[in-house]
Image (spheres, rainbow, N blue to C red):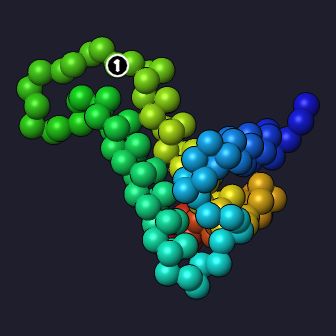
Amino acid sequence: MADRLSEIFDRRESFMLRLRELMPESSPDWPVDLSAKENQQHVRDMALRGVEEMFEALQHLKNWKPHRQTEITEFDRCEFLEEIVDAFNYFLSILVLTGFSADDLMDAYRKKDEIINTRLESGY
C-alpha cells in the first residue's frame, strides 16, 4: 500500500497545478518566499479559508450550547467530514505553497506529539 500522506500531498499539488492552469491568478509559483508581503498575504488568505471551512463544519454541531433544553439528534456525519476535508485541503495547500513535504509534516507531527505527550505525563 502506498504512503497515504504522500498520496494526499500529491493529490493536492496536482489539483493546485490544474487550478493554476485554468486560473493563473489562483496562486503564485511555489515554493513561495515568505519574506515577500504578497506571499504572506496569499498564505494568510488560504489559512482564513481553511478556518472558514472549519466554521462550516462546526455549524453541523447543534447540541453544544450548555443552556439548550432540547436536543437535536440528527447529525449529517458525511457533510461534517466533507467540511473538515475542505479545511484540510486549504491547510495542505499552505504546506505545498511553502515548500513542505509529507515527510516534513510527519517529522514535525512526531516531534510535537512527543512534546505534548511529555507534557501530559509531567502534569503540564
Q: Quadrant of residue 112?
A: bottom right
Q: Residue at x 52, y 65 (%)?
A: 43
Q: Position of residue 77 (x, y in %)?
A: 44, 21
Q: Amino acid at mark 1?
A: Phe
10 Å crowding of disc 1: few (<14), some (14-19), many (20+):
few
Q: Position of residue 50 (x, y in %)?
A: 45, 50
User: Which residue reaches farthest bottom?
Assistant: 35
Q: Nearer the viewer, residue 38 or 13?
A: 38
Q: Nearer the viewer, residue 49 or 32?
A: 32
- Image height check: is 83 above or below 16? above
Q: Residue at x 48, y 20 (%)?
A: 78
Side of 66 relative to 41 (left or right):
left
Quickly name the residue at label 1. Answer: 75
Q: Nearer the viewer, residue 124 or 41?
A: 41
Residue 108 visible in rendering: no
Q: Position of residue 110 (x, y in %)?
A: 73, 61
Q: Residue at x 34, y 19 (%)?
A: 75
